[in-house]
Image: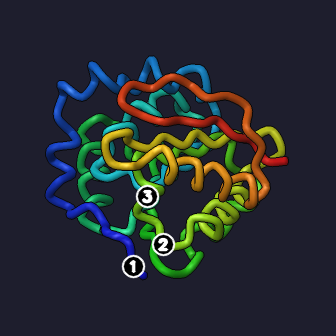
Amino acid sequence: MTKHICPWWVGYFLMNPLRRFAHNPQKMLVPYVGAGMTVLELGPGMGFFTIDLARLAGPHGKVIAVDVQSRMLKAIERRASKAGLLDRIETRLGGDDDSWAHGLTGKVDFALAFFMLHEVPDVTKFLGLIRSTLHGGGKLLIAEPKMHVSACDYADTVAAAQKAGFEIIDHPRIRRSRAVLLSPR
């Protein structure tokens, strides 16, 4: 069964500047992302977090933004170009195959899956692929929207992450979200 994918035009609503009051990328991600890091952002939409991730990773860092919709990736590239950060951001089109992860095995320091895992058809397989990209000390932050993902479905996601080889480090508090910070076992 195919899960619902957020339409590309909803990306404009998600870019609303008022969203920063609930999900300030700088405050939320500074504990996890530092200079020189390689960051994997999954389902970035039009890049609400992407530009800030690129700033946190610094001139020697890299953000790899993976989305299943090319329109979202084009919007990220436009925004990154305007911000002078295009050289720090690589966009990759995801899909039914695993080609987006090519060349990333063991190279990612931090991965972010924010409000997107509920759209993935095979969460365990997807999380296993994310796990393969992380090096031993890498971390994955998953956040799912409380208003859209039930506590039971969220628990299934966390169980899928554990099945995929992750262990729970923390449950960060993120407004209107259920969140978990994981690392590879």
Please give the residue where the numbered disc 1 appears in the rendered image: 2
Q: Amino acid at mark 3?
A: His
Nearest to the observer: residue 89 or residue 119: 119
- The colour mode here is rainbow
In which quadrant of the rendered image does the N terminus lie? bottom left
Give the SS element for disc 3: helix
- The image position of residue 148, as x and y in percent, is 33, 48
Horizontal and vertical percent position of residue 109 = 69, 41
Q: Nearer the viewer, residue 81 or 53?
A: 53
The residue at 38%/69% (across/down) is 68
Residue 177: image quadrant is top left
Q: Are marks 2 and 1 in contact (CB under 8 Å)?
A: yes
Whole-angstrom CA distance, mark 3 to mark 1, is 11 Å
Q: Please tell me whether residue 102 is drawn above or below residue 14 in the rendered image.
A: below
Whether residue 85 is visible, yes or no, is no
Q: Residue at x 26, y 61 (%)?
A: 6
Residue drawn at 40 percent across, 49 percent down: 149
Give, as a three-letter code, the residue at label 2: Pro
Residue on which disc 2 sits:
121
Q: Nearer the viewer, residue 162 or 42?
A: 162
Q: Is residue 127 left or right of residue 184?
A: left
From this viewpoint, is residue 72 visible? yes
Q: Marks 3 and 2, how far apart in space? A: 8 Å
Q: Residue at x 53, y 35 (%)?
A: 179
In the image, is 22 to the left or to the right of 34?
Answer: left
Residue beneath label 3, please?
118
Q: CA distance from mark 2 to mark 1?
A: 6 Å
Percent coordinates x, y for residue 99 in the rendering: 57, 76
